[in-house]
Image (cartoon, rainbow, N blue to C red):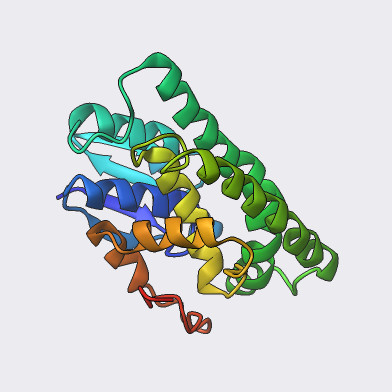
Amino acid sequence: MNRLYHVPLSPFCRKVRLVLAEKKIEVELVEERYWEQDPDFLRRNPAGKVPVLRMDGMTMAESQPICEYLEDVAPEPALLPKGAKERYEVRRLCSWFDDKFHHEVTANLLYERVNKKITKQGYPESKNVKAGARAIKYHLDYMTWLLDQRRWLAGDHMTLADFAAAAHISSLDYISDVDWNRSANVKDWYAKIKSRPAFRGLLADQVPGFPPSQQYADLDF
């Protein structure tokens, strides 16, 4: 059995979960308290981070290489386009969300509000939360600009870039940190991707002590 060591609200784990579900690859989900630095887990990934995927006799870490491996071994449905320029754009946007968006928004909102409590690292820093609340407006506006020109974030077809973005956005939507009134384009894009069968597992997530927002699992939000 394939096994994914994950944390429910981790956007990097969510990206991998979406790809696995979209490609209909069955996997056992194992919640991993990575912050406890369990020796068995550190043997799986010395970096001490999730996600970690055990599949095909391999133990794989880091969400982007995992997702591209899944694309190679299960090419249908395709989440990377064939053209070099188009693939570059998908990878650029994956990096945008997993690096810039993560640093400026996810870390300042989700990690401050949720992760600190779960990992017993103290209370949220209000200055960080305020910085994240400011930054997400810029990122939503950038997504709006992209979607003004394209059907999906990277082009006319849904790609891994959409899953990378949706992984972060869904984690923040769980804690009501997305202003869905800011952009009709982004809301329509999220409604489309949220309605996919691959998203059902994410919408069923429940984190003890942190109930999801009212609209989190609502497809007609």
Q: Residue at x 34, y 42 (%)?
A: 158
- Find the residue positioned furthest to the right: 127
In screen coordinates, is 74 left or right of 190? left
Determine whether 188 is above or below 3 in the image: below
Visible in this render: residue 47?
no
Who is closer to the viewer here, 94 or 219? 219
Q: What percent of the width, then of the height, locates residue 47?
A: 52, 40
Visible in this render: residue 137?
yes
Q: Quadrant of residue 146?
A: top right
Q: Residue at x 63, y 56 (%)?
A: 106
Q: Quadrant of residue 196?
A: bottom left
- Find the residue positioned furthest to the front: 148
Who is closer to the viewer here, 104 or 9? 104
Q: Residue at x 30, y 20 (%)?
A: 82
- Figure label count: 0
Q: Residue at x 80, y 59 (%)?
A: 131
Q: What percent of the width, then of the height, locates residue 78?
A: 25, 34
Who is closer to the viewer here, 207 or 45? 207
- Find the residue positioned furthest to the top: 84
Who is closer to the viewer here, 65 or 75? 75
Q: What percent of the width, then of the height, locates residue 99?
A: 62, 40
Determine whether 56 is above or below 180 in the image: above
